[in-house]
Structures are given as C-alpha cells and as structure tokens.
Amino acid sequence: MSNFTRRQFAQIAGYGLAAGELVTSPSYAQQGKLTAGEVVQRIMKNKGMPWITTGFRDTFKIGGPDQIVTGISTSFGGNLSVLQNSLKAGLNMLISHEPTFWTDGDVIGRVQDDPLYRYKVEWAKKNNMIVWRDHDNVHSMKPDLIFVGWTTAMGWDAYRDGSNAQAYTIPPTTLSELAKYTMKQLKLRSVRVIGDPKLPVTKVALGRGMNLPEQADVKISSDVREWDSYEYARDTVYSGRKKGLLVISHQAFEDTGMQAFARFLKPLVPEVPVQYVPTECFFWSV
C-alpha cells in the first residue's frame, strides 16, 4: 500500500476498530486494481483539512483496505436498501455518512447475536461488498459538503445569509407553503411542523437543540428529541411569539450531502464509476 504501512493505515483509517469485527471477502488487491484502501488514501489527501484520526466513526464497517473496488456509491446510511441498490449498479464499495449496524459507533457486541446482523454480514460477504464511513471528516471540510448538498437540493444557493452556512433569506412564503416546498424538494412523504400554518416566513435557520433563533421566523431541524426541542417550540408558540419549527428526518437533511460528496470523489478515482445512491424517505403519513 503506497505511502502507508499496513499498521499505519489501520491506525489512520480505522481498519475495523470501531466495528469490533471485520467482515472480509475473498477479493483482495491485485496489481493494477484500485483497492478500498487507496480510495480512502485519496480522500485523505484531497480533503483540504487535517485528517481527524481520533474519532471512532470514520472506519471500515464491512470489508477492508485490500479489497478490490469495482465501483463506489455514496449515501446517508449503510442500510440494506442502499447496499442492494449499489450492488445492482455494480458498485461494491459504499461510502456512508451514518452507521451500518444501528449504533453511532457500530458497536458489534450489542448486536452480534441478532439474526438481522448475521443476515446483513453474510449477505455482504457473499456479494463482496465494502462499507467505509465518512462522518467526522466530511463535516470538517470547508465548506461542509453535507450543508452544500442540502442547500443545493433546496434550491437555496442564492439565499444564504452571507457566510453563515445555516441561515437563509428566502422569497416571502408561509410556514405551510415552506413545509410543502421542503417535502417536494427533498422527495419526502412527511414532515412535522409546529406553528401557525399562515406564519409569514422570509428568514430560515438550520439547527438542533431547543432555541428558536431570534433572527429567524422558522428553524428547520432534523433528528431532534421530543422532550426538549418540540416542547420548547410548542411553549414558544403558546407564549405568543411568531415562530415556527419544521422537523425533517435525519436522512432528509444529510442524504443530499453525500450527493455532493460523490461529485467531490469522482475526479479522485477515475478508474471506477462513482454514483450517489439515495437513502429514500421511509416515513409516511395517513
């Protein structure tokens, strides 16, 4: 492996350390073939910022650096739907933003006896699939590609408030129309909204946590907790303040960022195809 020894690469790229168990396959490096380790090395070199080596997220979850890559997919999560669609497209390396095995650290000890875990592992081995996660490092890029992808998907590139990547001034609308627009742009089947549907909206902020920014009419949040963010927003509205909260799924906020990541990656690996494979919205309303 060029530039790194096996030991160095294991330390830097997390050769199975977070997962606690490395799922391997019989397809190992051959002369002239692109390997998963080389893909990760190129990402490291071209990130434009120091590589974060202290975290537990950005590691191989399935497979390892010596496996041959036939194509690369990028997506929000390492779920079976994305893996299956990647395989159909001839892409055997998935770069996911979020976990593969249902905990932030992909802690295998918690699920190793679960039949679903065993099914997923055996399916991946049988089909020579590789999963490597890029979470902390993609968020540390300047600009953060997750925000870049989301902003582009919303059609709001021209509406940023200066250098603030999480604030927008959009054409006048209402909270109800903003909710409908968000569903359409992100291809969602549901959102959750607190506030007056007729609330006038021009200032939008992104963020998590309880606060509803003073300068924003509406905050758009994802993966928030019901006992703080929702309740704070509810009390804010009942206190008489003209504010709104629009909550989308975690996937809805970050998946399009991995589409931006695919655009970043393509010129780095000209030997193989690179394709964004959406993690489709799985929530629905009656």
Image: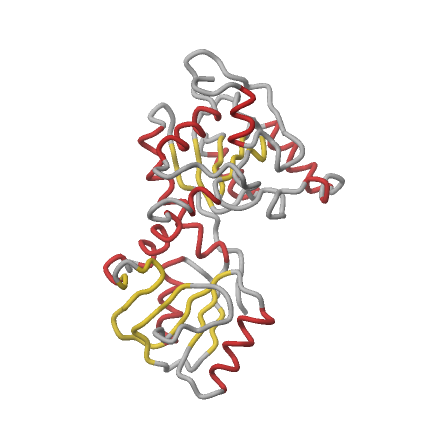
Type of colouring:
secondary structure
Q: Nearer the viewer, residue 16 or 63?
A: 16
In the image, is residue 86 above or below residue 174? above
Q: Position of residue 11 (x, y in %)?
A: 55, 29
**Residue at x 53%, y 34% (from the top left corner):** 131
Q: Residue at x 59, y 48 (%)?
A: 104
Q: How many labels, in total?
A: 0
Left or right: where does residue 165 sit relative to residue 33? left
Q: Residue furthest bottom?
A: 240
Q: Quadrant of residue 127?
A: top right
Spot the residue most to the right: 113
Q: The C terminus lies in which quarter of the figure?
A: bottom right
Nearest the viewer among 160 and 194 is 160
Q: Position of residue 244 (x, y in %)?
A: 42, 76
The image shows residue 190, relative to residue 69, as above or below, that is below
Farthest residue in the left direction? 158
- Give the percent coordinates (x, y) of residue 87: 50, 33
- Image coords of residue 197 (percent x, y): 40, 80
| Residue at 43% from the left image edge and 47% from the top image edge | 139
Q: Is residue 120 left or right of residue 279?
A: right
- Residue 262 occupies quadrant: top left
Please tell me whether residue 79 is drawn above or below residue 40 in the rendered image. below
11 or 73, nearer to the observer: 11
Which residue is rendered at x = 40% and y = 32% of the image? 43
| In front of the other: 10 or 96 | 10
